[in-house]
């Protein structure tokens, strides 16, 4: 049996859980074994049904006072106990923050190896390909274990229902006590007003091409609209247009936004080093050969002072 | 307070990472090495806590003899002690690494006569990314651990009994955990902005006496067969337009990324 | 992006400071149909330009480097991409203070404002300096900081706008294709550049690839001798006092010369750069690609252990640096060559393949202009660039072994105090002379001339110091790489005779039905003379300036021998090959290592030679300038052979005698025979100190590379003959034009009237471009901007005075004119001898 650990947050199934089921369904097929699921901290019917739509024959639910909210110790201990009791051939979760954490917790308790972030698994020989360096490299690994503990890479597959069944529910009694409470979420805070440059989801960066201190007003406006921050290149700081705290680069701040909109920035290495962790880059530049344009995912070859206001207007229009 | 930071020496590659001909490792012939970024934040966090509350920061690494360079780097930004467990082969599996770190910590704590108040790990290493060593070590030591931490506060002066409050980023906010000391945390970049060493700091770090521990254990169940590069992705820049009329396409992208 | 071309007139490879400036300068000179390819992105492709420290200290002892540095600084200024920050070289030692005096002298020569400062004066300009560790400073207000990337962009745009230059970034050159059809001149021809975007057929390719240049050259099976070397640099900050200037650079750059470091403000930080660490050299193939590099290809991982000592010394000089954070530190790559000079010009092996390599940002625009003019006019007009000419290298210099050894040796001299006569320690005796064992037995002090070794003096002659009552010079600097023995050898030659090893002579022969006609095309003077006659002649470039001066010999009806000096052999061979007809009428042979030459001179020379040779050695039997085949009986030296030789009656030292040419293998027997014959006649082995300096200077003989440069013509040099031959020759038209008016300047000899400095010490000028000044201490500059300076210097034992050569305006070039020369920042009175020689002006000793 392949057991898929389902991730949810206070009863809301995570997309990662659907990915794990999708990945797990294919793996179970290769293993020629049943697909079952573990739902820790919830027995919500909706979740059980959803797991069934993705092919889980049985959903093992476990509800406990200590499992009222997420806690790596309690979740990991429960999963480890399920493994011991249910004796699956393999256990799979999705390689999200929680997925990897819970699997590592379980693995530590079972003193069993755990292979994180697989993108391909061959169960006959228990060899797998996993990602390293954020996907820049792949590692072929082999696994020698009584039970294969795995996570699949986040977004390694797109979730897709299939093999739909009416999942049976089996309740699991976990042996948990107060010692497992120490790492339970104690409190939650919502995003504070105003983001910082290193944590901003969107950074609107400007370089020498912005032309003046005043020219940054357009970037400010767009950044504010997108809940982001304004960054700048070293040349801009040197020219005195922006404070050093806005400088993105080797000698300034290193940013990692979802998208970096780099306007009028040539992409000197100094700057690139600070920006290269951005998940996506959109460059706006008049020079098609500019380093920033070459390295970007998307580019607009035009004057930023024409493009930025147009983007701002378009965002406003779509938001109504 | 006494804080232990576990760090890993990793190559500092560019956008394209090469692999040795036999696939056994990253081809680092012309690469520099650095401290895995999450752990660099861990060292900075530890130094900041000790600056605020008093105490000592010990940095521990398991790696080749050259990993002493990362211990010195930590010392150059304020760490007080360095411990090196030398390995002569590359690519230790996570179980083996965790077992040796645990053993090293036990040796150090026995010498100190008390546990470290806080042990910091990186959430995962930049290179192998196993997502488990810190958790295995903490479990072995019987200490609570939470990963993904981007904020740390301690009760009292951080020493002895008390709590550590840790913040973990989730969508739209933070989860707050409160752990009893002694405990461990897996930290992430964004915890802070690590300082750069000063020139005097660098020169001071050369005097750091590095404690060497000779420890090893049997390998675990995961074994590397080879490293390889994913099929070449043609990363052509997509030109969305050559004027303000590109705005619609740009906003489509923003929508797709969910940042609108 | 325009469509990738299949043909172009010129393809420039590399868009760093040099490549960009090249397309701009070529466009200015009217070139069309240019293509610029660059493997990296723009504007910063990832080469050395992208991380350069971008400052220019205009004072250099070397004329080419100083004037091209100044030329470059002015080009940056003209584009408004330069700030005069000022710069100070500080001294921590008294040796360095002397060097700063020497720099004051060079500043005066090139007309650059400079001041010597006390430590307190340095502190006024640089308030954060620790005056306790310095003895003084050399302040140059026109030290500038430039924006090399933006300059590249501007120059590239000029190329695009004026010449329609097509630019292709992210385009990697994969191969260079040459036409290898054998030709009499042995040169291949460039045909095409193969890139990952397509192949471009072209007549001209310029390699401006910085540290990668030799990798590109290898694609055409040729060699550009440069090696990528590390220069460490760390950016530390923020520092309040710097940030408060609110300026990219507000304080003068400090060069801490004795620790081989510089401290240059960069906005709120200080950039500390070092040439003091161990030499770290790389092979071009080890440089990562743009994708593989963590920063850029030429910003390699910093190795902190190598920088620690410099860090300590920097903190010692500027305490505030200690608490500044090291925000950015690199092992930056730059290019080093075997002799520290750039590699410019057409590559001899491959027609149409040009090198513009080993050029730093500080001289980039000027060097680019040099190459562009060279391609346009056949020679650079802005300056004589023979020191940077890539044709200067011999094969032995074009190897990794050589360049690595030399770069290893000279890297730490980047900020060092380098004596004008300083010798290399590595890579000696690259060409084995026939006489080496004999010379070593005589304790020869070898000086290296490129790859050849020449005894400068023989320590076995030390007894002559006693004979002539000679002692070392009192000032160590003046005495360094010098010995009074050389004066002893000179005086002995003047009264007895001496043997000089001339085996470093570069000897070529032109042969075939077109040989004489071709030889006449190269030379100013008539080569179509009787067989057995020699011709000393200038070779001119198309503008009528000197390409070379050398001797040509009519060996047979259809055979002309060319004998030239070792420093110019490579250039002269290339010049000959480049111009020779390829129709088969002329063949070219290099006989340098097949023929050896010994010089035998002095009043007793005829008597010595008479003992081993039956020929009539009188002026009638062996007239001046004649070449006579003879037999020499070597029995006296212990070898019973009779060897064939040519006697060439000539003298470069002012006493009668011969150059004796024979087969390389006969050399030792000839040497032994001459010494055996001369035993009773005072014969002594005599070094280059006499041949190249004292003997030559007493006679006022001009030397290529010193007095003779492309910037001067034969009339100015005093080498014009009364009549001009009928045959055409390169540079004839401008030469004829120059003859229509009297020359503006003339080459003269001067005597130093008082060598005593302010400390009462006797000083000896070196011939290192010391400025010749009028009695008001003003520089003497002609209408072309050429400055009067010392081109050669040395003591003339037979005239009892220190002798100098240099060019002066014609009105000053007359005997008795009183002037001054600056040496080590002090003025010394000199008197003009005139264009003729100081010793035996009527050549009576030559004709006796």
Image (spheres, rainbow, N blue to C red):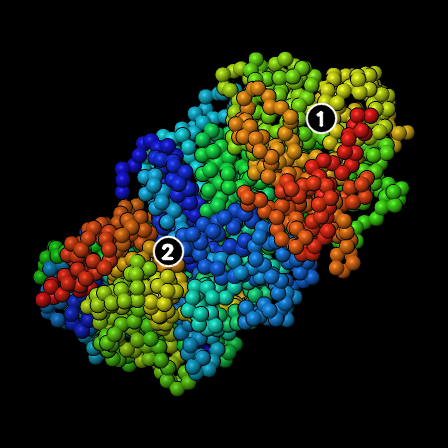
Q: Is residue B127 left or right of residue A87?
A: right
**Residue A268 in view here:** yes
What percent of the width, then of the height, locates residue A44? 12, 71
Asked if C389 appears above or below C76 in the picture, the reply is: above
Q: Secondary structure at mark 1?
A: strand
Q: Residue furthest bottom?
A: B156
Instruction: Give whichever of B21, C595 is nearer the camera.
Output: C595
- Check disc 2 and report the residue beneath it: A268
Tag 2's secondary structure? loop
Q: Residue at x 65, y 33 (%)?
A: C718
Point out residue C129 in the picture as x, y percentages from the top left corner: 57, 70
Q: Which residue is mark 1?
A: C596
Which of the image's four quarters has the N terminus of chain B?
Answer: bottom left
Left or right: C673, with A15 as reference point = right
Foreground: A49 or C598?
A: C598
Q: Is residue C485 left or right of residue C365?
A: right
Indicate the position of residue C496 as horizontal and vertical percent values.
86, 32
Quarter-wise, where is residue C788 in the image? top right
Tell me the quadrant of the picture where the C terminus of chain B can be found: bottom left
């Amino acid at each position: 049996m392949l057991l898929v650990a389902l991730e949810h947050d206070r009863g809301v199934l995570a997309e990662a859980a659907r990915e794990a089921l999708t990945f797990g369904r294919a793996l179970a097929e290769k293993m020629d074994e049943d697909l079952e699921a573990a739902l820790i901290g919830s027995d919500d019917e909706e979740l059980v049904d959803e797991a069934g739509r993705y092919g889980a024959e049985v959903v093992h639910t476990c509800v406990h006072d200590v499992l009222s909210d997420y806690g790596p110790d309690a979740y990991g201990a429960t999963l480890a106990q399920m493994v011991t009791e249910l004796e699956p051939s393999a256990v799979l979760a999705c390689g999200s923050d929680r997925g990897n954490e819970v699997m590592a917790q379980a693995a530590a308790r079972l003193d069993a190896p755990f292979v994180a972030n697989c993108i391909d698994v061959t169960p006959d020989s228990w060899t797998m390909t996993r990602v390293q360096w954020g996907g820049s490299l792949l590692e072929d690994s082999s696994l020698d274990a009584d039970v294969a503990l795995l996570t699949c890479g986040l977004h390694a597959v797109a979730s897709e229902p299939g093999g739909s069944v009416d999942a049976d529910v089996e309740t699991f009694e976990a042996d948990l006590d107060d010692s497992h409470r120490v790492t339970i979420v104690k409190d939650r805070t919502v995003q504070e007003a105003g983001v910082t440059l290193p944590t901003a989801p969107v950074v609107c960066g400007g370089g020498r091409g912005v032309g003046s201190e005043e020219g940054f007003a357009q970037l400010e406006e767009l950044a504010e609209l997108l809940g982001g921050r304004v960054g700048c290149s070293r040349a801009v700081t040197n020219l005195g247009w922006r404070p050093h705290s806005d400088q993105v680069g080797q000698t300034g701040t290193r940013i990692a936004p979802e998208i970096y909109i780099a306007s009028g920035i040539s992409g000197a290495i100094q700057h690139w080093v600070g920006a290269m962790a951005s998940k996506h880059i959109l460059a706006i530049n008049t020079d098609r050969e500019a380093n920033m344009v070459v390295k970007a995912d998307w580019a607009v070859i035009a004057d930023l002072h024409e493009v930025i206001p147009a983007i701002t207007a378009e965002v406003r229009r779509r938001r109504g | 307070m006494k804080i232990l930071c576990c760090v890993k020496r990793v190559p500092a590659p560019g956008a394209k990472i090469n692999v040795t001909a036999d696939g056994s490792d990253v081809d680092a012939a012309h690469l520099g090495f650095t401290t895995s970024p999450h752990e660099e934040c861990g060292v900075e966090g530890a130094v900041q806590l000790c600056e605020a509350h008093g105490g000592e920061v010990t940095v521990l690494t398991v790696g080749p003899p050259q990993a002493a360079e990362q211990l010195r780097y930590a010392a150059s930004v304020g760490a007080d002690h360095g411990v090196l467990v030398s390995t002569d082969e590359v690519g230790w599996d996570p179980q083996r690494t965790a077992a040796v770190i645990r053993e090293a910590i036990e040796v150090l704590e026995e010498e100190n006569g008390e546990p470290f108040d806080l042990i910091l790990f990186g959430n995962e290493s930049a290179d192998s990314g196993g997502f488990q060593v810190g958790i295995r070590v903490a479990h072995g030591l019987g200490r609570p651990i939470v990963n993904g931490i981007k904020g740390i506060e301690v009760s009292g002066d951080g020493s002895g009994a008390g709590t550590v409050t840790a913040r973990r980023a989730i969508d739209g906010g933070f989860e707050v955990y409160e752990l009893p000391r002694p405990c461990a945390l897996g930290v992430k970049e964004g915890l802070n902005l690590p300082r750069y060493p000063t020139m005097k700091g660098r020169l001071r770090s050369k005097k750091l006496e590095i404690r060497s521990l000779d420890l090893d254990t049997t390998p675990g169940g995961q074994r590397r067969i080879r490293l390889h590069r994913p099929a070449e992705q043609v990363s052509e820049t997509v030109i969305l337009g050559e004027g303000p009329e590109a705005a619609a396409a740009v906003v489509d992208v923003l929508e797709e990324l969910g940042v609108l | 992006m325009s469509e990738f071309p299949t043909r172009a007139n010129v393809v420039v490879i590399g868009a760093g400071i040099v490549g960009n400036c090249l397309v701009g300068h070529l466009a200015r000179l009217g070139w069309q149909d240019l293509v610029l390819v660059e493997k990296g992105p723009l504007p910063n492709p990832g080469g050395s330009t992208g991380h350069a420290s971008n400052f220019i200290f205009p004072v250099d002892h070397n004329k080419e480097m100083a004037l091209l540095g100044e030329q470059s600084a002015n080009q940056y200024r003209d584009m408004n991409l330069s700030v005069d920050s000022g710069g100070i070289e500080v001294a921590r030692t008294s040796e360095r203070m002397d060097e700063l005096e020497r720099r004051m002298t060079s500043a005066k020569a090139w007309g650059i404002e400079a001041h010597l400062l006390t430590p307190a004066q340095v502190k006024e300009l640089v308030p954060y300096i620790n005056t306790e560790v310095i003895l003084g400073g050399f302040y140059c207000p026109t030290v500038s900081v430039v924006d090399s990337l933006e300059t590249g962009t501007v120059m590239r745009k000029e190329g695009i706008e004026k010449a329609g230059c097509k630019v292709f970034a992210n385009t990697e050159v994969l191969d260079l294709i040459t036409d290898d059809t054998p030709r009499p001149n042995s040169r291949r021809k460039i045909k095409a550049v193969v890139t990952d975007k397509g192949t471009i057929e072209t007549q001209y390719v310029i390699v401006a690839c910085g540290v990668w240049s030799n990798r590109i050259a290898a694609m055409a099976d040729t060699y550009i001798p440069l090696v990528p070397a590390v220069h460490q640099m760390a950016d530390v900050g923020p520092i309040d006092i710097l940030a408060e200037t609110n300026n990219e650079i507000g304080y003068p750059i400090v060069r801490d010369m004795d620790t081989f470091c510089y401290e240059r403000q960069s906005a709120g930080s200080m950039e500390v750069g070092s040439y003091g660490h161990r030499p770290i050299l790389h092979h071009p193939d080890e440089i990562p690609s743009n994708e593989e590099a963590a920063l850029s290809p030429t910003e390699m991982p910093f190795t902190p252990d190598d920088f620690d000592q410099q860090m300590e010394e920097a903190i010692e000089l500027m305490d505030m640096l200690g608490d500044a954070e090291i925000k950015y530190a690199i092992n930056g790559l730059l290019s080093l060559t075997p002799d520290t000079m750039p590699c410019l010009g057409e590559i001899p092996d491959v027609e149409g393949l040009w090198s513009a390599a080993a050029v730093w940002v500080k001289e980039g625009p000027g060097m680019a202009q040099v190459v562009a003019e060279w391609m346009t006019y056949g020679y650079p007009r802005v300056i004589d660039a023979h020191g940077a000419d890539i044709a200067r290298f011999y094969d032995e210099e074009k190897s990794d072994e050589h360049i690595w050894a030399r770069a290893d040796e000279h890297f730490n001299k980047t900020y060092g105090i380098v004596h004008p006569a300083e010798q290399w320690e590595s890579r000696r005796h690259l060409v084995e002379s026939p006489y080496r064992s004999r010379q070593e037995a005589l304790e020869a002090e070898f000086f290296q001339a490129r790859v050849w070794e020449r005894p400068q003096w023989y320590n076995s002659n030390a007894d002559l110091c006693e004979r002539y009552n000679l002692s070392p010079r009192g000032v160590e600097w003046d005495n360094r790489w010098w010995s009074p023995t050389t004066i002893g050898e000179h005086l002995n030659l003047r009264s007895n005779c001496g043997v000089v090893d001339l085996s470093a002579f570069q000897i070529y022969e032109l042969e075939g039905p077109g040989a004489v006609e071709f030889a006449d095309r190269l030379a100013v003077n008539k080569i179509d003379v009787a067989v057995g006659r020699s011709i000393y002649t200038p070779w001119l470039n198309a503008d009528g300036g000197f390409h070379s001066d050398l001797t040509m010999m009519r060996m047979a009806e259809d055979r002309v021998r060319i004998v030239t000096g070792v420093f110019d052999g490579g250039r002269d061979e290339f010049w000959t090959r480049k111009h020779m007809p390829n129709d088969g009428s002329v063949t070219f042979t290099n006989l340098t290592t097949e023929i050896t030459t010994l010089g035998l001179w002095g009043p007793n020379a005829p008597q010595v030679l008479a003992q081993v040779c039956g020929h009539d050695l009188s002026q009638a039997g062996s007239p001046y300038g004649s070449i006579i085949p003879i037999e020499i009986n070597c029995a006296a030296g212990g070898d019973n052979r009779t060897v064939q030789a040519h006697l060439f009656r000539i003298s470069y030292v002012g006493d009668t005698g011969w150059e004796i040419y024979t087969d390389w293998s006969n050399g030792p027997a000839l040497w032994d025979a001459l010494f055996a014959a001369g035993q009773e006649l005072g014969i002594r082995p005599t070094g280059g100190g006499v041949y190249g300096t004292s003997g030559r200077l007493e006679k006022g003989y001009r030397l290529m590379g010193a007095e003779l440069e492309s910037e001067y013509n034969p009339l100015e040099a005093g080498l014009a003959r009364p009549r001009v031959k009928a045959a055409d020759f390169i540079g004839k038209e401008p030469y004829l034009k120059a003859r229509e008016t009297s020359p503006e300047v003339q080459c003269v000899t001067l005597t130093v009237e008082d060598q005593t400095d302010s400390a009462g010490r006797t000083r000896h000028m070196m011939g290192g471009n010391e400025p010749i000044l009028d009695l008001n201490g003003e520089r003497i500059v002609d209408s072309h901007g050429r400055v009067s300076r010392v081109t050669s210097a040395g003591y003339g034992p037979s005239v009892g005075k220190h002798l100098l050569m240099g060019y002066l305006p014609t009105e000053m070039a007359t005997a008795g004119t009183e002037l001054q020369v600056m040496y080590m920042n002090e003025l010394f009175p000199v008197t003009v001898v005139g264009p003729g020689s100081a010793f035996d002006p009527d050549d009576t000793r030559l004709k006796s």
